[in-house]
Image: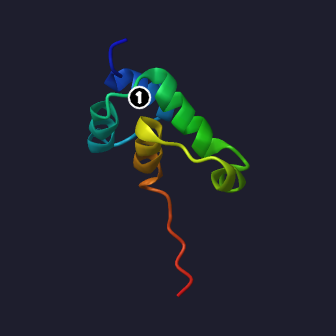
Amino acid sequence: MPGLTRDQVIEICGRLDDMRIAAIIGTGADTAELMEARTWLNSDDYLATALKRSVSGRVARLVELLRADETEWDDR
């Protein structure tokens, strides 16, 4: 199966900057992997699930790329 296109990334993830889209395409992921990463991030039990099961490979890299713009909480 061929890799992701820009239009597919936008369709699945919504509007992202061009650098992030290029990074996502550069992973070589397919639509199923990108959809799994989005589902993983959007799940209500993300943190609880993370303790039981961690993603790996391309899906893990996609999760990192998609989380890059989330606010980091600093308790200092």
**Is the image coloured rainbow, by chain, by secondary structure, or in one colour?**
rainbow
> Residue at the spot x=40%, y=44% of the render?
61
Which percent across, then down, holds residue 50?
63, 52
Image quarter (top left, top right, bottom left or bottom right) of the N terminus: top left
Q: Position of residue 67 (x, y in %)?
A: 47, 52
Look at the picture and state if 63 lies above or below 28: below
Give the amino acid type for the residue marked by disc 1 in the picture: Val
Residue at 41% x, 28% y is: 9
Above or below, 18 against 48 in this view is above
Q: Quadrant of residue 21?
A: top left
Q: Across the whole image, how many numbered discs are drawn on residues?
A: 1
Residue name at image x 61 percent, y 36 percent: 39
Q: Viewed as shown, does residue 64 lie left or right of 35?
A: left
Element type at mark 1 = helix
What is the crowding at mark 1: few (fewer than 14 residues within 10 Å), some, or many (at least 20)? many
The picture places residue 24, in percent across and down from the top left corner, at 34, 36
Which residue is nearer to you in this view: 51 or 5?
Answer: 51
70 vs 76: above or below: above
Query: Where residue 70 sits in the image (x, y, percent)?
Result: 49, 58
Task: Report if residue 22 is visible in the image.
Answer: yes
Horizontal side, residue 53 vs residue 76: left or right? right
- Residue 15 showing in the rendered view: no
Residue, disc 1 = 9
